[in-house]
Structures are given as structure tokens and as C-alpha cells.
Image (tube, rainbow, N blue to C red):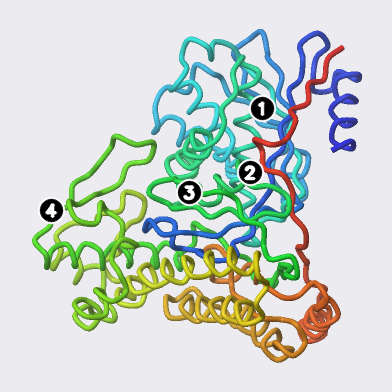
Amino acid sequence: MSDFTEFVKELKRSGTFFDSGEPIFIARAPGRLDLMGGNDDYTGGLVFEATIREATWSAAQAREDNRIIFYNPQMRHSGWKDRVEFDLDQLTDDETVLALVNRDPEATWTAYVLSTIYWLKKQYPREINHGVQVCIASEVPLNKGVSSSAAVEVAVMKSAALVYGFDIIGTALAEACQWAENVIARSACGIMDQITSVLGDEGYVLPLVCQPCIPEPLIRLPEPLQCWAIDSGVSHCVSGIEYEAARAAAFMGYKLICQWENLPTLRDDSGAVPRYTDPRWNGYLANVTPSLFRAKYEARLPETLSGAEYLALAGEHVDPFTQVYPDHPYRVRANTRYAVEENARVQLFSELSRGAALHGVARSFELMGDLMYQSHWAYTECGLGSEATDRLVALVREEGVANGLFGAKITGGGAGGTVAVLGLKTAEPAFRRVVQRYAEERGFEPYVFEGSSMGADRYDKTVVED
């Protein structure tokens, strides 16, 4: 925090970015670790999310003109432009903003930040009547499956809103940032990333029912337990074909089940993010119980369908944020099963966590770990596994319960990224052996996530004034 604040003060003293006179508002938003739930958020499931120590910082200051200026020095390291300018008057409609963020290949990263200013202008047209300049710095590694995009969206929107005289908090902030990522950044994420970055806290895990965004009271993990995470070295991308196909396949299964039950699926645009709904399950596959799914639907669902075969059967696709490609094979049965069963796994994991926090029963820890292993295998069935993350999970299993490591799983959208590990605090040596063995096998030192931090709403906002 002090380093970023000093950097902002220097930018103001030197006049190289910020001006004297107007106050500068600083916000902070952490990345998140998906302990359980993963891709269950867009199908209405319960997810179990923790913040990480690493965070994104955003400093925003009002301008007298209508210019919107973003400055992110870290972008230079990726070969992108670190300073990009727009005009507030250009933010007129979705298609225009999409064109703006895609006009320069070296500035497409601005989709995640200009979209937040655009959302503010749409919702508060009278207040958003002048420009803003925003400086961004992030400790959250990109493409590791720990939600770097949500962290930057939340931090920028929160700091910019303060410039315009109001604060956005809680689910309203999370839903606004999800809209920005879905509609302008064109990344089909669920809500869990943004809400964890907003509401999480140090030392706690956030249970969230994604229907569409119902946070439950924070839970402290049982005192003997600790979570770590290890980067596999394989980049994860929510906009990648694996994630998009897995998500689309779950909605395909949902549509077919509704069709068999003669349930109409109707588009609902009343919420922050458009979706489809039905009169029995309210649009959420997670509301289908595992017993009903096994008894009536699982065997009937095809293992795979091409996009063309699906459209011939169902007539329409009921997810506004994914496409159906005619020649692509979709794992309909596995992804539908995942949506139903992962919700049940997370509910059990959550209740085991609550109970074990009171009684500390070793059997509960082992059950929690096995649920993580089950979840990891289900990712593979959905087409979201990777050889690298499988190897990390195998190394944790080899150390095993005898050495205090209970479970591990791929996190977030899968297809690479990070593996979460659950074990005893006293199992640090066993965890380090896993990291060392993986490093020796792969020839690089993997990034390790450990510890947590406060969410954006808990951060005491800083104001830098003359």
C-alpha cells in the first residue's frame, strides 16, 4: 500500500500524470482463490471463495475536460501501451465502446477498465459529466486463474465512483463489474470473482449462492487448516475455447432437460446481467437435485453433441454470453452433471467447514479433501483439465493425509491456471516438498499463493490531497 501511495504522490508532485488541486481517490481489490465451486457460478450453484494477498490498486482523479485517461506502467512489460486515452462523449452505446477498446491491438486491455466508466455513465448520466484519469498497479498475476480481471474492474470502478461523489458497494458493485466483463470485455464469467474481491476478508472464506448473487456469512476455516495455491505454469483464460465450450455445454443440457419437461425458457433482462429462466428451476441447473438428475436425465443426455446437432434438437441457445459453433463437439452430459453435482459437493464442503470449525474432527478434514479431489476429476470430464494441474494434484495426493495434506483441485475456469491445496498448518514441509518436486520436474519455480486479505469494501479508502 505505502509503495503505491508514494508512487501516486510522486506522479502528482512531478505533474507527470496527476495534477495538483483535485483529490486522488485510491481503492484496493484483491484477487480470489476458488477453493470449491469453480464453474458452478454461472449455473446458480454455491461457491466457496477466498481472497488472496495479492491485489490491484487504482488511483483516480477528476479532470476538468471530458478526457478519460488510463495509465498502467505494467502493461509495457507485456508489449502493450501503458497510457491510453478516450473521450467521455464517445461512450454512447455497447457497440461503440466495443469498437473503442478493440481499435488498437496494443490497448485491448482497456476493455476491462473503460467498461467500468461506461457502466457508471449509463447508470449515473448526470453525475458522470466530466473526465477522469486513473492510474493502475497490480500484484495479481495474469492468467493464473486467480481473477486478475475482477480485481482490476472492482478497483477501477470503486475509485472512479468516488471521484464522482458516490460509493458503490456489495452486490451492486460486483454485478456492475460482472456486466462490464461480460458485455464489453466479452468474457463469459460468472459472479463469484467480483463478489469475492468486493466482500472477502482476511482469514475467511465466502460462501455465495449464485442466484444471481446471494452472499452468505463468511466462514473461518477450522483453526488447524490452511489453504495454499500453486501456479501450474499453464496460462488460463476465461475467454478461451475450453471454458466457453464447457459453459455452453452446461446450458445445452439445461435447455434439453427443460424441453423434455415442457418448460418454457424465457429471456429475462430485468437483472444486471441478462439470462434465461423457467418456471421450475428458475434458470439454474444447480436447482436440479443430484438424485433427480441421476434418475431422470443423466442417461438420456448425449455424451457429446456438435453445435449443429444441438441446435437441430433445441432450436435455440439459452446463454447470452457464449456462442454455439456448428462443428464443435460439446460434452453435454459431463458439463450438465458437473453443474448439478458440484453444487452438492460445495454444500457439503461448506457444512463440513462450519462443523469442523467447532469440533475439529479429523474425519471432516479428510472428507473435505476428498471432495476437492472429486471436483478436480469432474473438471477433466468437462474438458477443463490439464496435464500440468493433474501432476500437481497427484503430488499432493502422494504426500497425502499421513503428512497433513488432505486435498487439491484445479481452480476457477480450469484448463491450466492454479491448483488449490488444503492441509494442516503443520503440513508446511509436505507442501514445500510438492512445490520443490514440481519445480524440479518442470524446470521453473512456480508462483505460490498463501495468505488472504480484505476485500474492496473493507479497505479504508485513501484520499491523497495537497
Secondary structure, mark 4, is loop
Sequence-wise first label, 4 or 3: 3
Dot 2: few (<14), some (14–19), or many (≥20) neighbours within 10 Å? Answer: some
Tell me which residue sits at (78%, 39%) in the image. Answer: 73
Tell me which residue sits at (30%, 73%) in the image. Answer: 332
Check the image and name the residue furthest to the left.
262
Residue type at tag 1: Ser
Residue type at tag 3: Ile
User: Could you say which disc has been placed on residue 264 in the image?
Assistant: 4
Vertical relation: 421 (above or below) 261: below
Residue type at tag 4: Pro
Secondary structure, mark 1, is helix
Secondary structure, mark 2, is helix
Disc 2 target residue? 106
- As measured in the structure, the alpha-carbon distance from the residue carrying label 4 to the one carrying label 1 is 42 Å
Sequence-wise first label, 3 or 1: 1
Q: Tell me if 216 is positioned left or right of 432 in this view.
A: left
- As measured in the structure, the alpha-carbon distance from the residue carrying label 2 to the one carrying label 3 is 28 Å
Sequence-wise first label, 2 or 3: 2
User: Could you say which disc has been placed on residue 115 in the image?
Assistant: none
Quadrant in the picture for residue 336: bottom left
Asked if marks 2 and 1 touch (Cβ < 8 Å), the reply is no
Front-most of residues 204 and 320: 204
Asked if marks 4 and 3 touch (Cβ < 8 Å), the reply is no
Disc 3 target residue? 191
